[in-house]
Image (spheres, grey):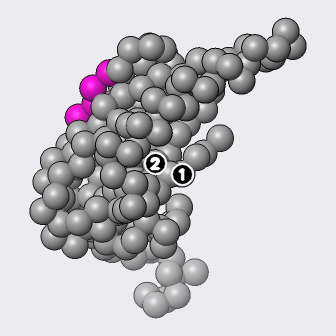
Amino acid sequence: MDTTRNPTPSLTRPRLVALGALLALLLPAAGCGEDAPEPTETGEALLSVGTIPDGVTCVRVTAAGEFRQVVTDYDVTAGSTLVESLSGLPVGKVLFSANAYDKECGSVTKSTTPMWLSEEKSVTITQGKSSSVTLTLYKNGRAKVTVEFADQEDGGTDAGSATDGGV
């Protein structure tokens, strides 16, 4: 299951922390019934992305666990840094990766080629404990590659081709 989050600029970090604390207080009361389903284990990580380079306007972070993944988008500004708390993550071994795009996050699709990308980083996420994740993004190079096949080891044509009178 993919979930995409695009934080709105009007929610400041203190407001988000206060909202999270309020939800944490209210959630236990919501599950007091005897028939309440068992809660799904989730974990948290602190994400740190260094200085955003020119041209980058969206950073997409993927946290892929054994049974589900969480995809989170961040609209960013060149020259800023990105430090965010990620919650609702799968627990256990989680592969983190990030891509950076030159489009607003709302315009990025699965077929959009990232300008920058990271290698996957494996982190063990435990419920109730926050883990740190630092991802390094690298420029995504592009090249046009042409592959040709030669009929003979010396690169010549077949002995029986129509151009040399063969049968």
Which three-letter amino acid code belongs to the residue tagged 2?
Answer: Thr
Q: Toward which corner of the image does residue 95 lie, by quadrant?
A: top left
Q: Is disc 2 placed on a helix, strand or loop?
A: strand
Looking at the picture, tell me which residue is in the foreground, 165 or 122: 122
Contact between labelled residues 2 and 1, with CB atoms less than 8 Å apart: yes
Graded by Cα atoms within 10 Å as few (under 14), some (14 to 19) or many (20 or more), the crowding at tag 1 reads some
Whole-percent x, y for residue 97 in the image: 36, 41
- Magenta residues, dominant SS class: strand
Residue beneath the point at 53% across and 25% down = 24
Quadrant for residue 129, please give it.
top left
Residue 43 horizontal side relative to residue 156, left or right: right
161 left or right of 98 in image: right
In magenta stretch: residue 134? yes
Question: Residue 13, image x and y in percent?
Answer: 32, 46
Q: CA distance from mark 1 to mark 2?
A: 5 Å
Q: Residue at x 22, y 72 (%)?
A: 55
Name the quarter where the N terminus is drawn.
top right
Label 2, residues with CA under 10 Å away: few <14, some 14-19, many ≥20 = some
- Which contiguous range is marked in magenta? 131-135
Determine the residue positioned at 39% across, 61% down.
10
* Residue assigned mark 2: 72
- Give the vertical position of 28 relative to 75 (above or below): above
Picture layout, residue 90 above or below residue 148:
above
Q: Position of residue 22 (x, y in %)?
A: 51, 32
Q: Kindly give the residue lying farthest to the right in the view shown.
A: 35
Residue placed under numbered mark 1 in the picture: 4
Q: At x 46% / y 48%, what residue is drawn?
A: 72
Q: Amino acid at mark 1?
A: Thr
The foreground one among 142 and 8 is: 8
Q: Nearer the viewer, residue 18 or 91?
A: 18
